[in-house]
Image (cartoon, rainbow, N blue to C red):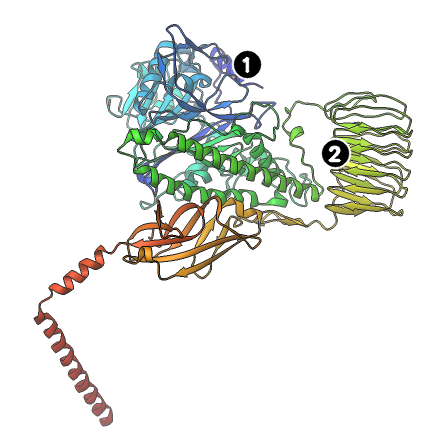
Amino acid sequence: MKKWLFKLSLVAMTFLLLPVQAVQACCGFIIGRQLTKDGTTLFGRTEDYPYYPNGGKHNKNYVVVGAKNYKEGDQLEDESNGFTYPHATSEMKYTATYDSARGDGSNGAFGEHGFNEAGVSMTSTVTAIPNKKVLKTDPLTENGIPEAAMLDVVLPRVKSAREGVEFLAKVIEEKGSAEGNVVVFADQNETWYMEILSGHQYVAVKVPEDKYAVFANTYYLGHVDLNDKENVIASKDVEKVAKESGNYKTDKDGNFHIAKSYGPEKYAEGDRSRTYAGITLLDPNAKVTYEDDEYELFRTPTDPNKKYTLEDAFALQRNRFEHLNGRFVPDDQIGVKKQGDDGSNDTVRKDQYKYALGNENVIDAHVYQINPNLPKSFGGTVWLGMGPSRNTPYVPFYGNVKDTYKAFKPQTATYDPNSWYWTVWHIDQMAINNQDLFGKSIQNHWKALEEQLIIEQKVSDSKYATLKADEAAAKATEDQVTEDALARSERLFKQFKQYESELSATLKEAGRTDDPYRASLPDDYKDPTESSTEASKEETTSSTEPSTESSQEETTSSTEPSTESSQEETTSSTEPSTESSKEETTSSTEPSTESSQEETTSSTEPSTESSKEETTASTEPSTELSKEETTSSTEPSTEASQEETTSSTEPSTEASQEETTSSTESSTEASQEETTASTEPSTEASQEGTTPNNTTTIVPTNSNSVSTVGRPVLPTNSYILVDQATGIVLQNPDFAQGGYSLLVEVLKDIKALADKEYEAYNIQLSNQNNPIHQISPTVVTIPVNSQKEVEAVYGIGENGQLESFQFQLNEDKSAVTFTTSHFSTYGVVYKSAAKIEEKKNDKKLPSTGQSISIATMVGGVLLTLFGFGYNIKKRRNH
């Protein structure tokens, strides 16, 4: 269902005055800069898409919208509800994360979040539904400003967070609002939280820097001082409308309470579960219960020393009630098979299933990190988590990028291997649907990557922070920032594709289904299964009579002579013939030679067949059912599925890239991956028609790493190389490919550093014993003396030339971190000013001080001797 249908439902609620709370959708958070370890402000949101039939599979595009000048009369028009607004004469460049379905006349753009070139960021929106009494007095406006257009209307025009609130308020007053919404704006100085309460009413507040907030699909503002113009921006009639509606509510002190007046009488279950989970995750000792009537919006951690990190923000958006020790279970696990259980013996009580923050409907998760030390034009960093947050990697991008990687741009409605969104979506699907096989290993894999990216970003932040006072110089770095972002995106996407392939191969080796194309189709898509002559994108069911059938995906042949052509498969007849197919070739019962890109099914006569995926042999005629469904006749026949090839009972030679199942007849079968023997006539049912290998190892759910025969799932530390002698650590996702080794030599006499206090190392990297001097950006961590102050980190060339590197000192000052693509000699130089000062102080000491010290020492020795003699004498007396 397109989002416009949901919008129509909201309009219907307005007219019908239904007291219905929002469909379980987005959830936001804010963490003030005084509560973070690094002094940055964190805020973000998960964008959920629970709308049938595409719930949880809705492609997003991360793009840059260029600055543009408009003529008088040019208007922005939103296709979701017909909202229009005049363009500004000149609009700034900004980033956006659009729905891929934009532009088809039914969906709307839904840019959702971004930075502009003035350093302003926003995320819009968390949907909320006003109560029916308020809507009767101030109804939502059918063609008012909607979520779908909000980013494109506001972000290219405003130069501060406050200005963002003021401009959006102006639009609401002029055009009305189509929905109840919550929006967040930020710049390097302020963060603002805004609730759009009805057709024309709103309240926005400046977020306290020492508070955190978690907010789902409802209103949370309690009492605010509407006269505090410095920290509050509100519509002039916000109290008046509440009173006129007969729903004016107050807090215990008699003050106007916004959420109670404009929101529902009680929280919807999905809003309660996510708010409670978020609060208790960030503050385990918070004095809240699941049954509380309301949750305070801006909160102070129970522990006054608590400081939050990016990892805490990622964990919040991924959370699936793990911290609640089994009290709740994510409701996307209802009916999910558990290890050793077909789902029928599920012991989880119905009331334990709750809507989680990291749920099946998340299509875009983002965390904005606003660093006040960066130049204004950078804005900050967005950590982008395309796809379901429960198993997606967060990747950083500065706000001043001028372009994004090509994998962010495909506007495809179903699985696309060239799409960033669809790739990470597919990885999440494999993870969540095979928890007994993968456990937490996939999420841990991403955490290891994020650990490296966080270090890299800190180093980069330090580099660009030096341009804080020179905005012109900062502006000049945009091309380099963009080049770096594109290069990193390309590198990471290649690694994601490799990882996706590894996981998919692991599933196939375990005899499990992996068909992302089919899984990405709408939930209401039905596979054709009825007639014997049926063309389908996914299936073709063949009869026992001669026929010609075309199918995009599969063709199953009968035992009678026939010729069938298919875009995906070709099934040969019982007469000698040669047929080629894009996907599969199924041979008849007569001798033949067939070539297929994907699969080959052999006949009952001697033949040679090649299959890209699998070859399954049996000794008798058999019927095999797959998820893609190939239905055979009652006569001996050969059936081909998208993943399977069935061979005959006669001697044959079959080559398969993936799997080969051999019969008991004399045959020779070569398989790159697996060989499974079958000796009896059988009917085999498999989700993909895959016969499990008896040697496949399935690791229990609680395992953090998984291995199958010949194909290990990458462990979480696969990015890391450590030199045990020096403690030097290298981190690079390329290391996950294997074969890399690290050797470090401690150097003493470096002429280029002769007048400095330093530690120097020759860092040598090799792959399969071949030295490597250049590689993709690698994070290097070198232990240092925490009692000394690090002055610089240098790369030292063969001729002694020094190259200075930007570095980051860790919290306890025990290690420096920097990023490099070249491996040779590196030196850490310490400041010597303190030592020089100490020497100067030593020289200034008067000679009498030294004499006294010597006299004192002599006296001390004499006293010691005297005491020693006295002690001996005393002991003798005893």
* Res. 462 image quadrant: top left
- SS at badge 1: loop
Q: Please tell me how crowded label 1 is: few (under 14), some (14-19), or many (20+) other residues with Cα within 10 Å.
A: some
Q: Which mark is residue 106?
A: 1
Left or right of residue 692: residue 679:
right
Mark 2 vs mark 1: which is more N-terminal? 1
Q: Who's the residue at 26% across and 24% down the image?
A: 225
Extreme residue in the front direction: 799
Q: Position of residue 686 (x, y in %)?
A: 75, 37
List the residue tagged with mark 2: 598
Extreme residue in the top direction: 73
- SS at badge 2: loop
Q: Quadrant of the N terminus?
A: top right
> Can I make out residue 326 in this image?
no
> Can I make out residue 736 in this image?
yes
The amino acid type, in three-letter code, at marker 1 is: Ser
Identify whether 815 is placed above or below 176.
below
Q: Position of residue 772 (x, y in %)?
A: 51, 50
Q: Who's the residue at 45% across and 58% down the image?
A: 744
- Residue closer to the observer: 302 or 418: 418
CB under 8 Å between callouts 2 and 1?
no
Q: CA distance from mark 2 to mark 1?
A: 38 Å
* Res. 621 image quadrant: top right
* Res. 296 image quadrant: top left
- Residue closer to the observer: 741 or 599: 741
Q: Position of residue 773 (x, y in %)?
A: 48, 49
Extreme residue in the bottom direction: 877
The amino acid type, in three-letter code, at marker 2 is: Glu
- Residue closer to the observer: 259 or 450: 450
